[in-house]
Image: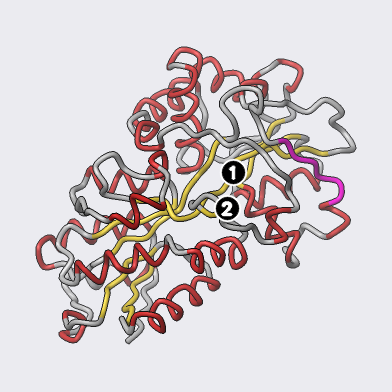
Amino acid sequence: MRVLWTTSTLALVASTAISTAAYAQGEVNLYSSRHYDTDERLYSDFTEATGITINRIEGNADELIARMEAEGANSPADVLLTVDTSRLERAKDMGVLQAIESDVLEARIPDSLQDDENQWFGFSQRARIIFYDRNDVSNPPLDYVSLAEPQYKGQVCHRSSTNVYSQTLLASVIENHGEEAAKAWAQGVVDNFAREPQGGDTDQLRALVSGECDISISNTYYFARAVRTEVDGLSAEDRADIGWVFPAQNAEGAHMNLSGGGVAANAPNRENAIAFLEYLSSDQAQQYFSAGNDEYPAVPGVGLSESVATLGMFRSDDVDLSEVAQNLGTAQEIFNQVGWK
């Protein structure tokens, strides 16, 4: 059985179970905020390999987490799958995940990409890097800190401070450079804004093409997707005008976002849930994260898709994302203090 839930329907189902069959051996109930059609292959391959059926509920990450909390011990959820460290840490803080022991996950997922208490694990990554207009910028910033330099005044586009990607990036700046330096950086970026923060990552790339700004930040998979297939507002000619920089290659390395998951605190199919997470760390699933959604595998040594490899080699920041997550509250305070809307 496959169940799809939209954001508008989530509020109506707080007390609705998937079905009594969902508690039977051979099934796993997945709450997912990943909205990529290409993930269908992940689910079908897992079922084919294990015989375990996936019953899926999809929706907004925050609403899914809130639903799991409201359902409590009666929740049918076995696995939460979502994007960004901040949401995984929020789920942990709200008590809707549980610690698990898995030799497979411990061996395959790097320590920096998993929770210190084994409540969540990262399964794919996106580098958050600097993009710029090749026609207007001859000396692009080479690291995140440089985005705050006065020479880039009126040139920078970015997402809002309420976006999880923005929050986690600032949290990593805090971890790598300290709170005081992070606040100065955030203030400098605000001073350099070409427009009010708005839109998603693809909108930041489109803003380079339209001339609204000269420099922006985006996760790599948005640009890699435009390399692989047509994306509205980013033609092949447009893409040729966009350059990119993997930041901080002589320092901490490029900031990495992740997509990950964990076993629900009251999972009725706990062993199947662990089996699903272990499958996501397999070479087959890791290659599909890259080929199907233009992401970087979490497991070292897994090959990249052509669209991702086109961006080139780089050194990533190996800071412990579990430690970065502890700075999220401070990051939001800094955003508020500097007026980053």
- Percent across and percent down for residue 303 are 62, 58
**In the rendered image, which residue does mark 1 sit on?**
127
Q: Is residue 159 magenta?
A: no
**10 Å neighbourhood of mark 2: few (<14), some, or many (≥20)?**
many
**Residue 155, above or below 163:** above
- Percent across and percent down for residue 203 are 66, 50
Q: Which residues are magenta?
A: 240-245
Instruction: State how far apart marks 2 and 1 are (Cα).
Output: 8 Å
Q: What residue occupies the far left of the structure in this picture?
A: 73
Q: Quadrant of residue 308?
A: bottom right
Q: Quadrant of residue 249?
A: top right
Residue at (47% x, 30% y) in the render: 172
Three-letter amino acid code of the residue under disc 2? Tyr
Q: What residue occupies the far top of the structure in this picture?
A: 180
Q: Earlier in the sequence, mark 2 or mark 1?
A: 1
- Percent across and percent down for residue 158 are 62, 37
Number of disc labels: 2
